[in-house]
Image (cartoon, rainbow, N blue to C red):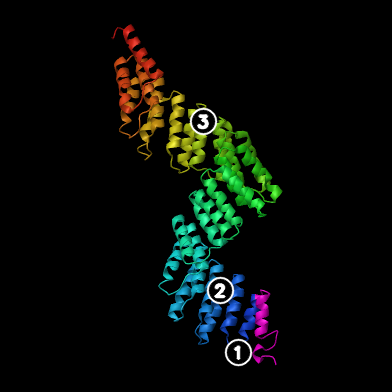
């Protein structure tokens, strides 16, 4: 005889369950409302159905309906509502529902903790997720594998690789066998700090524990090798991924391409980028950026520009990183006009240049001695309300030095402390060289004297330029004094130093000063 509580198959409990099975949350909610008594187990099924459909508001309303019926929601009802909120990234509401459990005298279980921790960990509230994990012992709740997995993932998201590995070790100590999720999160934690040795150790450990690595595991391991510039290992892992009959993702390719870029393997990087269509993986901006960077690092500006030009056709919108790498490639190739045209293109495409964009453009002008254009770009950088850095100012000072504009070079050099930009060996040496070329020996010696005050190390270039400036001014005493200070600065005079010093003395003899 059929159970009378089930009622009509299309309207009773059976109907509710059938609606849940076919993921028809609206029908499930409607049929649940027709039940004479609110069954909390049935509620959980409907709430789960709503959760999968991201209908968190409906799940919360159902929870309120239970309370309105003068029934106390049980732990499963609360947990279902928390899960529904978490599935829609409503972590604050998930925390509120979790807090309501204590007020309703409903004791949470491990599933409740896991649900609320997961709701926090996914949208980036990793600190709160770890706090909840730490609260479990006080609540007399023993963490399970899911709890640890969430904790490891939260630690990885927060960049706390050491804590992530500590949690993995604690899992093993509690005889909770880590699974592929545990290991993948741990390997990802290693990736952020380039701990490729530990990441590979975990891959080996997985093989011993019969935990088969998945795409996420391999991608994280490739990323760990990429962060450390271990391009050969990154390519080996990429090969293993394919051999394991796993589908490489755009992340797999991007990480491998970036590893090749860091290792100066521009041809391998381009080969990977060109092979993506064969794997039915569409290259995105990150993939192209890695390829452009590979060409930029190797001075292949033509290839970098080609990749930048084909991005729109591949439905990959060029980003600031794309343009910056392209401008930098042109700078290294002394293609200053193209570098400036790329800066102009950024404005046209409404990609806001940053200090790196302007600095690369300034450096491109500096290499060919276009000091006017370098200063114009520096002015544009300031007008864009960006803060110049030492690279942009160093390049401008060097451009002025090459253009014989010693006064402008010294003006920029003297303004660096006021702009809270530390002067360095390059900027000081460029300032001295600018004075040397103009025959301003007093100014050159003055800048040389400022080097210790600026807590900058002396270099052979700074001394040699000062000695040469004194030589041009026939100031043999100053030249010899600068020459004699080099050993104290732990610098050995070279041929240029001695030649300039001897020439200074020779000029003084001719003029009758010695």
- Location of residue 276 in the rendering, given as x and y in whole percent from the top left corner: 67, 47
Which residue lies at the image location 43% right of the left edge and 42% below the top edge? 387
Q: Tag 2: Cα neighbours inside 10 Å, few (<14), some, or many (≥20)?
A: some
Q: Which residue is mark 1?
A: 36
What residue would you read off at disc 2?
Answer: 57
Along the horizontal axis of the image, is 335 left or right of 137?
A: right
Nearer-N-terminus badge (2/3): 2
Q: On the image, numbered disc 3 is attached to which residue? A: 365
- The residue closer to the viewer here, 436 or 86, is 86
Front in this rendered view, residue 83 or 88: 83
Mark 3, Cα crowd under 10 Å, few <14 / some 14-19 / many 20+, is many
Front one among 21 and 146: 146
**CA gap, disc 1 to disc 3?**
81 Å
Per the rendered image, the range of residues in magenta is 1-24
Point out the image quarter for the C terminus: top left
Q: Label 3's element?
A: helix
Is residue 21 one of those drawn in magenta?
yes
Gap between marks 2 and 3 measured at Cα: 59 Å
């Amino acid at each position: 005889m059929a159970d009378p509580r089930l009622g009509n198959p299309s309207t009773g409990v059976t109907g509710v369950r059938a609606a849940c099975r076919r993921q028809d949350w609206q029908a499930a909610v409607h049929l649940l409302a027709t039940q004479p008594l609110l069954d909390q187990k049935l509620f959980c099924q409907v709430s789960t159905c709503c959760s999968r459909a991201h209908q968190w508001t409906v799940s919360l309303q159902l929870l309120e309906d239970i309370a309105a019926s003068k029934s106390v929601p049980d732990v499963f009802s609360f947990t279902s509502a928390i899960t529904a909120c978490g599935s829609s990234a409503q972590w604050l509401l998930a925390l509120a529902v979790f807090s309501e459990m204590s007020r309703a005298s409903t004791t949470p279980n491990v599933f409740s903790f896991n649900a609320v921790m997961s709701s926090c960990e996914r949208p980036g509230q990793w600190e709160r997720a770890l706090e909840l994990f730490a609260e479990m012992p006080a609540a007399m709740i023993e963490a399970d594998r899911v709890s640890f997995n969430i904790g490891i993932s939260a630690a990885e998201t927060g960049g706390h690789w050491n804590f992530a590995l500590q949690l993995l070790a604690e899992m093993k100590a509690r005889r909770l066998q880590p699974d592929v999720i545990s290991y993948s999160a741990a390997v990802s934690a290693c990736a952020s700090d380039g701990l490729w040795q530990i990441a590979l150790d975990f891959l080996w450990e997985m093989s011993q524990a019969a935990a088969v690595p998945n795409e996420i595991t391999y991608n994280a391991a490739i990323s760990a090798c990429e962060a450390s510039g271990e391009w050969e290992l990154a390519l080996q892992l990429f090969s293993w991924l394919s051999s394991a009959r796993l589908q490489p993702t755009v992340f797999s390719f991007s990480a491998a391409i970036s590893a090749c870029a860091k290792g100066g393997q521009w041809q391998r990087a381009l080969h990977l980028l060109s092979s993506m269509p064969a794997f039915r993986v569409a290259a995105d901006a990150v993939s192209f950026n890695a390829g452009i960077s590979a060409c930029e690092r190797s001075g292949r500006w033509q290839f970098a520009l080609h990749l930048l030009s084909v991005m729109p056709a591949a439905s990959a919108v060029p980003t600031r990183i794309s343009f910056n790498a392209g401008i930098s490639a042109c700078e290294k190739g002394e293609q200053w006009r193209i570098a400036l045209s790329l800066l102009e293109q950024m404005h046209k495409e409404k990609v806001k240049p940053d200090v790196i964009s302007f600095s690369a453009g300034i450096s491109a002008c500096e290499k060919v001695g276009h000091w006017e254009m370098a200063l114009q770009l520096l002015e544009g950088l300031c007008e864009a309300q960006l803060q110049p850095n030492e690279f942009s100012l160093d390049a401008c000072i060097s451009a002025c030095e090459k253009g014989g504009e010693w006064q402008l070079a010294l003006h920029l050099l003297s303004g660096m402390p006021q702009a809270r930009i530390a002067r360095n060996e390059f900027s000081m040496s460029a300032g001295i060289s600018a004075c040397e070329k103009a025959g301003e020996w007093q100014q050159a010696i003055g800048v040389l004297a400022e080097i210790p005050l600026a807590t900058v190390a002396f270099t052979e270039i700074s001394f040699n330029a000062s000695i040469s400036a004194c030589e041009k001014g026939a100031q043999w005493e100053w030249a010899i004094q600068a020459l004699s200070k080099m050993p104290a600065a732990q610098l050995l005079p070279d041929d240029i130093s001695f030649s300039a010093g001897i020439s200074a003395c020779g000029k003084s003899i001719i003029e009758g000063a010695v």
